[in-house]
Image (cartoon, rainbow, N blue to C red):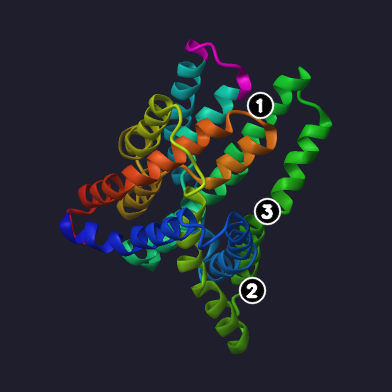
Amino acid sequence: MLAIFLKTVPFFALIGLGYGAGRTRFFTPEATAWLTKFVFFFALSAMLFNFAANLTLAEIFDLRIVAAYLLGTTIVYLIATAAGLFRGLSVSECAVESQCAVIGNVGFLGIPMFVLLLGPASAGPMLMVLATDLIVFSSLIVILITGSREGRVSVRTLRTVGLGLATNPMIVSILAGIAWSATGRDLWTPVEEFVALLGAAATPGALFAIGASLAGKSAERVSVAAWLSFCKLLLHPAAVALAALVLLPVRDPFAATVMISAAALPVAGNVYMLAQHYGVAPQRVSAAILVSTAVSVVTVSTIIGLLTGGTP
């Protein structure tokens, strides 16, 4: 267990470094925004393309894994939604809180950390989790918020969802990588080296950007943030484990381990972007991201340690 924790320390230390730079305003919010944009559109996209281009579609997409992940995630999504409705929240607020409960920081934190901790073979299941989150749940929150405001799900809403998916650089880079892999040809050496070099900037850049962005977030409404963090860090991996190991047993134990570990990641920053864009509880999401990221220093390594027997 200690070995796993020590392996995760450098990742969270980079987040801490970014947090310190943002907190002291050595790194301004504007600088953080531009760094995040560079990582999102260039470095992370290159890394995802590189992974996908070296994997087959079968290594990324397994219907049983997708079904198990969707089942476990849907269970927690419904629990968070029910809790929100019980507290008298609107549909829009419930959608945002439920998003916090199930959408982890897979792209910026999970993929680079798990490739080091669990090996390159973890990239396939992680890409599947990332794609499922983006395609299913990122679409769902848009549909719920706009549908509740307009009283119906309009063609314009569906068009917005489709355009968002078609222009998301993470989805585009994964699909482009799979398309290249399908040709059966290796990347031209200069292109491969270019993609690898650019992709290498994703890990430190993403982690530093996470920390710097956290510096601008507050821990208001700590009780709600604690509940959402509990859902994300503990309830989500437990539900995915129940689905993957009992309800819809996944044939590959390693894929199940990766999927459950991915479910243990802290709340993703893009949930805050959506909440801010639609003007729905951004401070609540901000607090959930801050609290879940801080607590995940312990919980993520503990869960991975339990799943792997305590050795990286």
Magenta stretch contains residue 108: no
**If the image is split into quadrants, where does the N terminus sit?**
bottom left
Find out whether the residues at labels 3 and 2 contact each other: C-beta distance under 8 Å.
no
Q: Is residue 99 visible?
A: no
- Across and down, in percent, residue 244 comes to 36, 40
Q: CA distance from mark 3 to mark 2?
A: 23 Å
Q: Label 3 crowding class (10 Å Cα cut-off): few <14, some 14-19, many 20+?
A: some
Q: CA distance from mark 1 to mark 3?
A: 20 Å
Asked if 201 appears above or below 101 in the picture, the reply is below
Number of the label disc, if any, that sits on residue 168: 3
Q: CA distance from mark 1 to mark 2?
A: 39 Å
Asked if 184 appears above or below 231 in the picture, the reply is below
Q: What residue type is disc 3 on?
A: Asn
> Which residue is tagged 2?
183
Looking at the image, tell me whether mark 1 or mark 3 is earlier in sequence order. 1
> Which residue is tagged 1?
144
Asked if 276 appears above or below 42 in the picture, the reply is above
The magenta segment: 85-92
Looking at the image, tell me whether mark 1 or mark 2 is earlier in sequence order. 1
Q: Give the residue drawn at x 51%, y 31%.
A: 284
Query: On the picture, is 76 further left or further right than 6?
Result: right
- Across and down, in percent, residue 216 comes to 52, 47
